[in-house]
């Protein structure tokens, strides 16, 4: 289902980009082939060095052979010149043709832009795919380590100790789950993974916990109070460590966010528990 949604979004984005590019071509919104006149200022460096002045900006340029000018771009250059340079596979400069020139002015024709939006969407798709592969490869080691530890904890029996340690808290959160029900173990492992910032590892544990909670649900078509509470906790879990994805993106800089992450997720968890308890009480009162 998710694949179909993503494919639909990509097709929709390409369609909008194509429609915008057709509009740009028909109405020539990029002013392709339209001469631009600049005031020509002298340069103290060399006769080959030019300063092109317009009403709101100045551009440094170099006079080339065969009636061409190389315009040098920097952070102060207008964004439209950067777009033209990128559209023509250049970065910090672009080559313009000289139409006419005298001692005080120069008229240029800039390189043309065609199908810009469609190329941007296509490039973004390739860049995102490349980033996804790099991110996935970077997470393999951490995920493999954590899932291996979880298997050791489960098979060694340490999970039973963990469940007993958090039993009072879980009994208050999930009062209708029997004391030794396997759902408590899955919930404990899921919460542990979320607290340690391993949301991807917590997903299969959360699905398993939901399946076990469904066996205790008397109304199969409606989520029980325990299922709603578990979903609220899973969504707003306290995180003592930054998410693995964030670590892969930011590296050691993520250490600056540890305290804000703990504070933010603690507040979100308190709100989630409070709201879930309030709605559970309201449903019991109506029943």
Image (spheres, grey):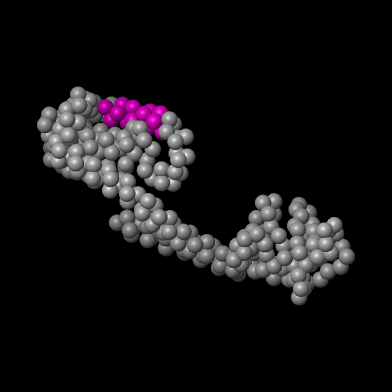
Q: Does residue 17 show up?
A: no
* Residue 168 position (above or below residue 118): above
Left or right relative to 140: residue 76: right
On the image, the x and y values in percent for residue 74 come to 68, 54
Q: Position of residue 156 (x, y in %)?
A: 15, 38
Q: Nearer the viewer, residue 206 or 37?
A: 206
Q: In x, y percent, where is residue 111?
A: 67, 68
Q: Quadrant of residue 47?
A: bottom right
- Of residue 84 and residue 36, the one placed in the foreground of this image is 84
Q: Is residue 77 above or below residue 117?
A: above
Rendering coords of residue 116 (x, y %): 56, 64
Residue positioned 41% across, 28% down in the render: 263
The boundaries of the magenta stretch are 261-277
Q: Indicate whether residue 275 is drawn in magenta.
A: yes
Q: Residue at x 33, y 58 (%)?
A: 3
Q: Residue furthest bottom?
A: 66
Task: Please say whether residue 110 is one of the residues in the magenta stretch.
Answer: no
Secondary structure predominantly adopted by residues drawn in magenta: helix
Position of the N terminus, as image quadrant, is bottom left
In screen coordinates, is 131 left or right of 42?
left
């Amino acid at each position: 289902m998710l694949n179909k949604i993503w494919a639909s979004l990509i097709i929709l984005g390409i369609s909008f980009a194509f429609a915008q590019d057709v509009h740009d071509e028909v109405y020539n919104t990029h002013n392709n082939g339209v001469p631009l006149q600049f005031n020509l200022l002298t340069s103290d460096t060399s006769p080959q060095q030019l300063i092109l002045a317009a009403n709101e900006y100045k551009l440094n340029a170099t006079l080339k052979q065969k009636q061409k000018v190389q315009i040098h771009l920097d952070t102060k250059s207008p964004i439209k010149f950067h777009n033209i340079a990128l559209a023509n596979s250049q970065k910090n400069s672009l080559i313009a043709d000289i139409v006419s020139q005298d001692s005080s002015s120069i008229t240029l024709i800039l390189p043309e832009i065609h199908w810009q939006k469609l190329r941007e969407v296509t490039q973004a798709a390739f860049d995102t795919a490349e980033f996804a592969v790099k991110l996935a490869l970077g997470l393999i080691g951490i995920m493999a380590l954590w899932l291996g530890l979880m298997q050791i904890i489960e098979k060694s029996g340490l999970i039973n100790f963990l469940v007993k340690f958090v039993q009072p808290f879980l009994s208050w959160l999930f009062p209708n789950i029997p004391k030794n029900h396997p759902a408590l173990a899955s919930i404990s492992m899921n919460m542990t993974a979320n607290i340690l910032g391993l949301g991807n590892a917590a997903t299969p544990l959360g699905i398993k916990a939901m399946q076990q909670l469904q066996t205790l649900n008397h109304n199969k078509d409606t989520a029980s109070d325990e299922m709603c509470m578990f979903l609220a906790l899973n969504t707003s879990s306290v995180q003592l460590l930054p998410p693995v994805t964030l670590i892969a993106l930011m590296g050691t800089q993520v250490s600056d966010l540890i305290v804000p992450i703990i504070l933010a997720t603690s507040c979100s968890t308190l709100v989630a528990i409070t709201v879930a308890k309030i709605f559970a009480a309201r449903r019991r009162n109506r029943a």
